[in-house]
Every structure is written in structure tokens, then in C-alpha cells.
Image (cartoon, rainbow, N blue to C red):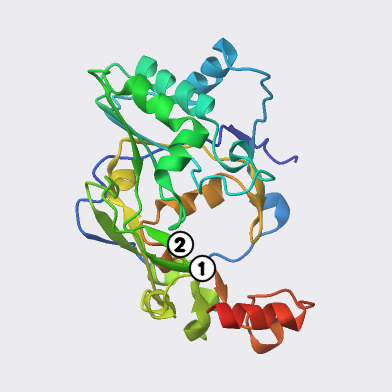
Amino acid sequence: MSPPPPTRRRAIVYSGPAGTARDRVLRTKPRARRATRGCQDKVDAFCQIRSIQKPGNELASIISAALPGGAVRSVVIKPNWVCHETDPDFPIQALVTSTTLLDATIESCIRRYPSLESVLVADVPLQSCDWLLLTQQAGIDTLIAKYRDLPSPRVAFRDLRIQRVKMAEGYMIPDRSPGDFGDPLGYSDVILDQQSFLDPVSRGAASFRVSDYSPEETQSSHREGFHRYRISRSLLECDLFINVAKMKTHQKAGMTGALKNLVGMNGNKAYLVHYKAGRHAAGGDEFPPDIPWPIVLQSRVRH
């Protein structure tokens, strides 16, 4: 008997119930870890890939077809707004989600949901990102101007970082300049405990690191059997969450897509382990096995 055909899914939209983060701390129920199955069993879904030369009705129709039904009142659109352009060899168009795509997604939501009250387009950029410069380079400022006076639904664009930093003589220092950022609803600590996929490699958690963040803060949120993530409540409490990623290469993940884009849900990225300090031979995964020692030394001096 041949296996059933895979389920077709459009992998840009996740619809969840509203009000799932009313409490300050969310704790998931423990569950038994499933045994790894064969590749054939794991591949039970695939994405549809469409190429569009320029925006228009075709783009709008694809987005509208992907949106679920229901009485949706609040939508959060999660782009990739990692950072402003710092090098012309890596232009802003290669770094962040297309503003044209975001505009089409907003318009599609407004047409699809007559009871829609709010649309929030938001991300948590790198802590050193210049938000004002990013909005100018990526054209986000044009979207802000376009939707500013729309009476209903309310459309907002927001930097969800808890804190910002700036560079001064090669060092990161707190950016205390005035600005409207952060999640107005606050943040919830989502505690996964043994359910976290980080748990099986949590022995030796003292070596957990996130570049440019305090190791002590990272280790306070992760140890064997305990794993905590600080998530923006606006993203947890919306009726509809739309993940609009930017496909590009990535230094650690290899490729950035919808899964990697969820890193930007974390208001404090010190809670999100990136690597174990040290070489592979010493139990770390900070460097590839053949890394030259001057690079290791440079990293140690930097920290």
C-alpha cells in the first residue's frame, strides 16, 4: 500500500487562539520525548514556492488565499528587520523583508477581515541596530506615513527590543537617547523545561553563550531541565501571527527562513543560546574544527 500524499501547506501563516499569554509566566506541560522516525515519516508537508516578477494583483491573491478565515481582530506581522545596512556589499534589500511584501500583506489582512481592529508590524532587531536609519533605508518610513492616519484598523510599526545599545570607541554601551520602543504589553517568560530541544545538550550549561551578552544572564535561563525565553506579549496574544521571513544565507544556521525568523520573538536575546564556548575537542561548538588559532585568540580578547 502506498503512503498517503503529503499535506499541502502555505508556510507563512500561523493562526492561534487569542489571550494565550494573560499570565506573566507561561509553563508548558511536560511530554514524553518522541523517538526519531525515518525521513519518510518526517517529511509530511512541503511549501509551495512561487516566483513573482513585480507586485500586483497576483501577489495580493496569493497572500489572501493563504490567510485563514475567522473573526480576526488583531494581527501581528513578523518581518526580518535584523539591522540597518552597514556595508554597501550587503545592501539593505539583501538583509530585510521586502517592504512591498509587507505592504501587500497589510492590505490583504484589511480586505480579508472586516472586524480587524489592529495590525502590528514588529521585530526585535540586533541590539546595535539604528532603528531610525533602518526605517529610512528599508522604506519602512513610507509605510508608517501611508498608514498613520488610517482610522481603522490601527496599523503600527514597532521596534520590540527591551533595550538598545550604540557603539562608542569599539565598545557597546547602553543607548539612552529618547525613543519609543519595546512592547507596550510587556513580555512573558515562556518556560519549556524538558520540552525544549536545547535540553539534551544542556549538560555543561556553564559554557552557553550569546555574543555580546552577559554569560551569567544566559546561564540563569538555561540549565538541564529548565529553559526560559522572554517573548513579546503582543506576539503571544494576537489572533493571527504572520511570519514574513527573508530568505538569505546565515553564518550559523546556513539559511534564514521562517523558523530562524522566530528568533525575533525574543525581547531579550540573552535568553537565546547561540553556542557553547570553546573548540569542538573541548566540548564547544563556537568554532569549526579547523579554525586558525589567531581567530580564537581574537575572540577571547574581544570578550
- Residue 32: percent from the left, percent from the top? 46, 68
Question: Which residue in the rendered view is the most extreme toward the bottom?
Answer: 282
> Which residue is disc 2 drawn over?
167
Amino acid residing under circle 1: Gly
Q: Residue at x 48, y 21 (%)?
A: 104
Task: Give residue 5's quadrant in the image.
Answer: top right
For this rendering, which residue is in front, 294 or 63?
294
Question: Which residue in the rendered view is the most extreme toward the right?
Answer: 290
Number of numbered markers = 2
Above or below, 247 relative to 190: above
Q: Residue at x 69, y 45 (%)?
A: 89
Q: Residue at x 64, y 85 (%)?
A: 283
Q: Which mark is residue 170?
A: 1
- SS at badge 2: strand
Q: Which mark is residue 64?
A: none
Amino acid residing under circle 2: Met
For this rendering, which residue is in front, 292 or 25?
292
Can residue 68 be seen from the camera position used here?
A: no
For this rendering, which residue is in front, 100 or 138?
138
- Residue 190: percent from the left, percent from the top? 33, 61
Q: Are marks 1 and 2 in contact (CB under 8 Å)?
A: yes
